[in-house]
Amino acid sequence: MQTDLKTRSNQRGMTLVELLIALTILVIGMGGVMIMIATAIAQNNGTKHDSNATMLAQMVTEQIISISGNLNPPPVLPTETDCAVPPAVHIIQVTGAAAPVGAGAPIVPQPAPVGRIAGDIDFTQPAVAFYSMQFVACGNGGRQATYDVRWNVQILGPNTKLVTVAARRIDRTNRTGLGYNLPVTIRTIVGL
C-alpha cells in the first residue's frame, strides 16, 4: 500500500522548476514575435514614404515633359505648390543642355563609384536652383513629410531629351535602423 502512495504523488503535476522553464521559453518567444511586429510596422512606414517619393518624381517628370522642347525657354515655367505653412510655390525648370552632363542636378558620372549607379542624380553634390526643391507633402492628421526632389534634363539629339528625376525623404532620420533612405529615380526619354 505504501508503494501506491509514492507512485500517486510522483504523478500529481508540474514542479515549480518546470513551470519556470516553460514561462521563460514563452517570454522569449513572445519577445521575438514583438520584434517581428515592430519591424513590419517600420518597413510598412518606409514603403509608404517610397510611394510618396515615387509620386513626387512622377509629378515633376510629367511637368517637364509637358512643355514642348521646341520652346526654349518656354513661355511659362510649370510650378508645384506644397502644403508647407505658408505654402511654397516651386518653379520647375525644363530647359536642358547637351548630354552627358545635361542641365540641372549633377548626375553620377561614368564609371560610377562603388555603390552608386551612373546616370542617377548625385545627392552628394549641392542642389541646383530651379532644378531642385524641398517639397513638403501633407499627410493625415496634419502630418507632413519633406522630400528632396532633383532633376536633370539632357538633350540627346535634335528631337530627343532624357529627363532624370529623383526624390527622397529628408525630414527625419531613420531611428529604428531599419531600411535605407535611398532616392527613387525615374528616367524618361521624350521625343520633341
Image (spheres, rainbow, N blue to C red):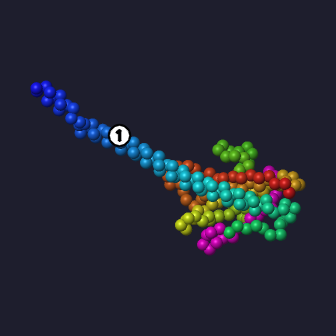
- Label 1: element kind: helix
Q: Is residue 99 magenta?
A: yes
Rendered location of residue 50, percent (x, y): 62, 54
Provide the residue designation for mark 1. 25
What is the three-letter code of the residue carrying label 1? Answer: Ile
Residue pictured at 33% horizontal, 41% vertical: 24
Decide: is 156 above or below 146: above
Q: Which one is in front, 146 or 8?
A: 8
Figure quadrant of residue 60: bottom right
Q: Of helix, strand and loop, which mostly describes the magenta segment?
A: loop
User: Could you tell me which residue is drawn at 84 percent across and 54 percent down?
Assistant: 191
State the image quarter where residue 133 is shown: bottom right
92 lies left or right of 12: right
Q: Magenta span covers which residues?
A: 82-100
- The residue positioned 74% from the left and 65% from the top of the image is 92
The N terminus appears in which quarter of the rendering? top left
Q: Nearer the viewer, residue 38 or 2?
A: 2
